[in-house]
Amino acid sequence: MIVTAIIPAAGLGLRLKSAIPKPLVRIGAKPILMHTLKALSKNRYIQHIIVAVPKDTMNDFETVVKKNKIGKKIKLIPGGETRRESVENCLRSVPSKSDTVLIHDAVRPFITEELIATLLEEVRNNPAVICGVPVKATIKRVNPSTWFDYAHHRPLGASGLSGECLSGFVKKTIKRDALWEIQTPQVFKKNLLLKAYARCKDSFVTDDAALVEELGVKVKIIQGSYFNIKITTPEDLVFAKAIMDAGYA
Ligand code: C5P
């Protein structure tokens, strides 16, 4: 098995409200991206690591990767407008001798070597393997056409999820027992993933496995970790620091 790791890191990080790209924000002594790359670089099957970064800050990423030696060569390539485009740019650079692709969001720095090893063991017998955690919260579906900013007393419209004072009306409560929150890494046989990206054209897909599911292929899911958080909004940096200070990373 020859694995290429693809790391989409080209998001603008608007929800984090940071002046520098999100993967370069520090947690403790190191940028988020370097925490992420550390565990990946230790796995012996992962021979290539390709990171999609924002075009206009490529130099900053180069400097950070050079400074923080992690023992494996990292290829930086320009990302795209959407996560999908960033992954597709990386897929074009996967070496032909690589038969397996692992995709991991740059902004999940708390992956463990054990989780990576388990996923790669599982992909020997299953063409698509992802991880996640059973949902702990109660989830309700809310009617998007009722979204309203309750602080400023104005409707937000169906695509108005920008406000922080959202309100709306409940459509349905979803039974929780079969719901999982999906994480990365996700691991695929390379040819299957290439086929999924070629066939399914959803531009705003945020989950690679969803494209494979569209092909009717069974996706295996294994339990990840509640510590494997995705750093998205400012409060996630507080959680990340707490995870690190408690010694879980
Ligand atoms: O936006 P979100 O947090 O879901 O992004 C998940 C991952 O996809 C992040 O690591 C982000 O940097 C990456 N991404 C990307 N190119 C984009 C948008 C997001 O590589 N155009």
Image (cartoon, rainbow, N blue to C red):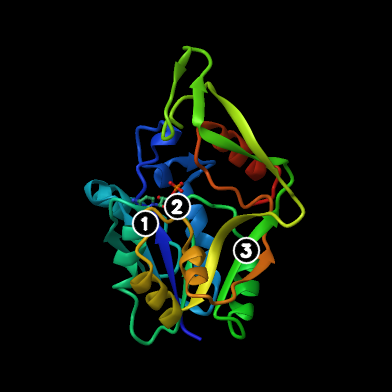
Residue type pointed to by label 3: Cys
> Which percent across, then down, holds residue 190?
43, 79
Q: Secondary structure at mark 2?
A: helix
Residue 165 vs 227, above or below: the answer is: above
Question: In front here: 14 or 109?
Answer: 14
Q: CA distance from mark 2 to mark 1?
A: 9 Å
> Which percent across, then down, holds residue 211?
46, 67
Residue type pointed to by label 1: Val
Which residue position is annotated with label 3? 131
User: Badge 1, how many Cα within 10 Å: few under 14, some, many 20+?
Assistant: some
Determine the residue positioned at 53% across, 72% down.
Answer: 187
Residue 102 vs 153, above or below: the answer is: below
Which tag, 2 or 1, sits closer to the chain's start?
A: 2
User: Badge 2, how many Cα within 10 Å: few under 14, some, many 20+?
Assistant: many
Looking at the image, residue 58 sits to the left or right of residue 22; the answer is left
Which tag, 2 or 3, sits closer to the chain's start?
A: 2
Closer mark to the observer between disc 2 and disc 3:
3
Question: In front here: 154 or 22?
Answer: 154
Which residue position is annotated with label 2? 33
Q: CA distance from mark 3 to mark 1?
A: 27 Å
> Which percent across, then down, holds residue 228?
62, 52
Q: Secondary structure at mark 1?
A: helix
Looking at the image, residue 98 sits to the left or right of residue 120; the answer is left
Which residue position is annotated with label 1? 65
